[in-house]
Image (cartoon, grey):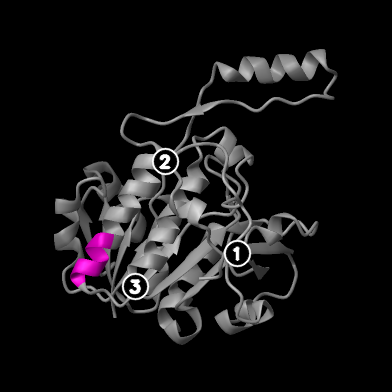
């Protein structure tokens, strides 16, 4: 199997590359800059049998060479929000003057040309088109929970990032490509958190349409390493993973660990996350119907 990984320079993407290599899979890692290329090479080590190439998902002409002779793609690209530090003043003052009874969220922004609409919709669409042109046999897309929650913080404060991801998911489902769509919850460790969150130490849970966010069991967080492991398992067991779209969360450390993709997906009894026409046609407004109109 020959697999290309986009977004390979990120925290989760680099773990996907590492897991693929550990399984002896021929891997090509796509990064956007020389800095990311050098960082990934250093992280993987000199003996890592990986081909690291530069390409920009916003420039379709650069993707073609990366997809030649590949069998599968793992998409781990995502827009990266940046904290607007001046907004922290309002967060602190609100907490002080309301004695903690009212909370205010900080504000975020995206670099020019790196908005969710550009990266999570157009950039993913470019990758899906390149996959179809290259005749890939499997696309694994790492998306996010909160795709059915327009008012969730990730959407209301971060330019509808998950709604744009959901639009890309609809495009992938409609493309005719064999696919697996994974919606992780909050990724551990969080960006900038120095506390490790190793994989393989928690029971993993699968759900659909943000059910893990609403079950009251605190299953909406998941280690990045476990997400990477499920991506690789999905490639290795396509008979279980293809045509599936599901949420991925975890319990606390200490519970019996999930031992297989089959065990993870079995409780879903074949159900998948569902998509609506409104999600597929999302254009950036805040109002979007979240009830499903048909299972894909």
Which residue is identified by label 1? 248
Residue shown at the point (46%, 38%) measured from the top left: 284
Q: Is residue 130 magenta?
A: yes
- In this view, the residue in front, 55 or 208, is 208
Pick the quarter of the image with the N terminus.
bottom left
**Does label 1 or label 2 sit earlier along the sequence?**
2
Q: Is residue 267 above or below residue 30?
A: below
Q: Position of residue 85 (x, y in %)?
A: 53, 20
Q: Residue at x 26, y 66 (%)?
A: 131
x and y, in percent, of residue 214 in the image:
75, 55
Q: Position of residue 227 (x, y in %)?
A: 52, 64
Nearest the camera: 155 or 49?
155
Q: Residue at x 47, y 77 (%)?
A: 233
> For the residues marked 1 and 2, what is the alpha-carbon distance in whole angstroms?
21 Å
Name the residue that disc number 3 marks: 176
Task: Of the two numbered discs 3 and 2 on the same chain, state the one appearing first in sequence.
Answer: 2
* SS at badge 2: helix
Tell me which label, 1 or 3, sits earlier in the chain.
3
Q: What residue is shown with label 2?
A: 116
Q: Identify the magenta region.
A: 129-134
Left or right of residue 167: residue 260: right
Q: Assess whether mark 2 and mark 3 are in contact (beta carbons under 8 angstroms).
A: no
Residue 23 in the image: above or below residue 95: below
On screen, residue 27 versus residue 184, left or right, reads left
Q: Is residue 40 above or below residue 20?
A: above
């Amino acid at each position: 199997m020959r697999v290309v990984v986009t977004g390979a320079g990120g925290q989760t993407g680099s773990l996907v590359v590492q897991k693929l290599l550990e399984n002896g899979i021929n891997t090509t890692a796509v990064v956007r800059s020389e800095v990311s290329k050098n960082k990934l090479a250093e992280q993987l080590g000199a003996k890592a049998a990986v081909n690291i190439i530069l390409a920009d998902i916003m420039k379709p002409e650069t993707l073609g060479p990366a997809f030649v002779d590949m069998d599968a793609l793992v998409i781990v690209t995502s827009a990266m929000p940046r904290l607007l530090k001046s907004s922290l003043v309002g967060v602190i003052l609100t907490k002080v003057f309301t004695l903690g009874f009212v909370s205010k969220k900080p504000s975020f922004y995206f670099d020019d040309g790196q908005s969710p609409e550009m990266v999570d919709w157009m950039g993913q669409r470019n990758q899906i088109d390149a996959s179809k042109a290259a005749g890939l046999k499997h696309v694994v897309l790492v998306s996010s929970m909160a795709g059915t929650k327009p008012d969730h913080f990730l959407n209301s404060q971060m330019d509808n990032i998950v709604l744009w991801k959901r639009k890309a998911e609809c495009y992938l489902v409609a493309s005719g490509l064999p696919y697996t769509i994974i919606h992780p919850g909050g990724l551990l460790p969080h960006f900038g958190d120095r506390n490790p969150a190793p994989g393989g130490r928690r029971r993993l849970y699968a759900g659909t349409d943000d059910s893990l966010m609403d079950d009251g069991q605190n299953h909406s967080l998941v280690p990045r390493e476990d997400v990477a492991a499920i991506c690789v398992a999905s490639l290795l067991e396509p008979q279980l993973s293809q045509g599936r779209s599901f949420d991925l969360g975890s319990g606390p450390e200490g519970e019996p660990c999930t031992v297989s993709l089959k065990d993870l997906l079995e409780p879903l009894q074949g159900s998948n996350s569902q998509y609506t026409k409104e999600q597929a046609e999302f254009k950036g407004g805040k109002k979007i119907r979240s009830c499903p109109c048909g299972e894909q």
